[in-house]
Image: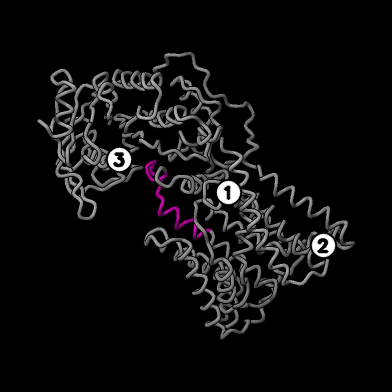
Amino acid sequence: MSLLELDGIMKHFGPVQVLLGVDLKVEAGEVVALVGDNGAGKSTLMKIITGIHKPDGGTIHFDGADISGHSPGEIRERGIEMIYQDLALARMQDVASNIFLGREPTKRLLGTPIRMLDRARIEQEAEAMIRKLGARVPSVRHPVGKLSGGQQQSVAIARALTFNPKLVIMDEPTAALAVREVEHVLDLIRELKRQKIAVILISHRLTDVFAVCDRVVALRQGRVVSDEPITQTSMNAVVAHIVGAA
Amino acid sequence: MAANEPSTAATVPQSGFRADRFSVRLESLLVLVVLIVALSFLSPYFLSVSNFLNILLATSVIGVLGFGATFVIAAAGIDLSLGSVLALSGVVGALSVNALNLPWPAAIVTCLAVGAFCGLINGLLNAKAGIPAFIVTLGMLGVARGLGLVFTNGQPVYGMPDPIVFLGQGRPFGVPMPVFIFIGVAIVAHFVLAFTRFGKYALVIGDNETAARAMGIRVERHRVALYMVSGTLAGLAGLIFLARVNSGDPTAGLNYELTAITAAILGGSNLFGGRASVLGTLIGALVMGVLQNGLNLLAVSSFYQQMAIGAVLVLAVWLDQVNRARGQR
């Protein structure tokens, strides 16, 4: 059984059919590109995997368990992390709080059953994660909103990788980055693959896709129109799938 | 991992103490100090222990309401029903011992329960039914006020058992009981907002609701809980009021929500969520209390006091916006 198996995923918003039965499999340690024009349903499909949207039909299996309809918190617990295009950061909160968002370790207040945030641990581990990623962030106590775009990206990445995920979904992770930072993200994807962590990469930049992915899946009008190993396709062929010319 | 350059990563200062979790907006503290100094010169009666205890006593109800407002504002909500819920809680609390002849602890329980229930309704209508908080709590402002009047025929319910009167009028060590309650609630509320997951999630929801949801925070449930906190605190404020005046008054707390929200904003909480401080609200409430006390001592008509409260609210929000505009690169 694959790490992730989507089977016949359907989704509509009111009268608009966004996904019309999508099948997708991702193996452990595999890097899969998901490409498609705007409105093809990529982001909706990913938000169904992460539990933000509930599918109208179809099933999702992850790591052998049926996770269809589970909440975002439960799905993160099982090891699926997503780096959102808008990064989904709380801009007035500091770096450490953002990295541990939703998973803050707590400790007892003076031995009572009352639990409080374990700030010391949160800061130390956030610091360690930032250091491990080689990111440049002034301080883990710095509000995220005051950081540069690249630094904010680092915080979002650190958050996704801190809890040993099995699958990381990245939605246009390089769209807003400078050339040097793009290379950094691509290196990161290669490193994840080495650690047997699966990646789904949503990207409009086909050069990035061909640089790091094993397989490329094209979505068009809510359906998978092609699913090919990267070695057996070309940029022209992928573009043709995206625009529906082939 | 992917470290292709030497890392000059984040640094954690050595001390475990985080000053920023006790920080209040400097401006509000400054305003408080300036007010106190100015009034000390303007009125010979201002600067005394007994007058300061008076100020604390007069601020206790507004302060407790302000703490409730702070929790809701943290999550980018608003609770306009605070004053009405205060009145309804007090009235039902008074009736529970007075008309239903229940033992005195019933007054405490019913005050808090009525407040919590109003908060629950606010929260459910806002978070689950998706009606804007402004509208939901404006509706509750009318309904709770009206219910209190209906239950009492518009007349105050006089005569509370001694233990309840003690809560409002007792003076252990010369300090009024409501001041103890006020300070105690401030400590607990500050702890919850600044040091627990519950408080952190309130701030995160106010900061970026979509992110909060994506990270697994149960936003709707949390919202309901926050309105229940502010409702319960309004119920507690209703109990203090009831105990102080020895009667459940359906007209109590008129426009108090305005003063309470002003105190929170004055204390540095962001009206649009993401930033909120209970200590700040404490300072803000004291500014309002000192202002009111000073105007009283200077024999300024209470009509002008209303105007002062309204002006301070606008001024506080304006100051905040100027500050933030300067803070952005």
The reply to whether the C-beta atoms of the residues labelled 3 and 1 are less than 8 Å apart is no
**Disc 1 to disc 2, how far (Cα)?**
29 Å
The amino acid pointed to by label 1 is Ala
Look at the image and say whether residue B217 sits in the magenta stretch. yes
The residues bearing labels 3 and 2 have C-alpha atoms spaced at a distance of 58 Å
Quadrant for the C terminus of chain B in the image: top right
Query: Which one is nearer the viewer's eye here, B177 or B53?
Result: B53
Read off the residue under disc 3. A50
Q: Secondary structure at mark 2?
A: helix
Magenta highlight range: B212-229
Residue B153 figure quarter: bottom right
Chain under disc 1: B
Q: Which residue is mark 2?
A: B51
**In percent of the image, x 67 and y 61: which residue is there?**
B311
Q: What is the CA distance from the residue labelled 3 to the residue labelled 1?
A: 30 Å
Q: Position of residue A213 (x, y in %)?
A: 24, 22
Q: Report crowding for label 3: few under 14, some 14 to 19, many 20 or more residues within 10 A (C-alpha).
A: many
Q: Mark 2 is on which residue type?
A: Asn
Between A191 and B320, the residue placed more toward the observer is: B320
**Magenta stretch prevailing secondary structure:** helix
The relative height of residue B187 versus residue A131 in the rendered view (above or below) is: below
Could you tell me which chain the residue with mark 2 belongs to? Answer: B
The vertical placement of A97 against B143, above or below, is above
Q: Which residue is mark 1?
A: B276
- State the residue in front, B228 or B5: B5
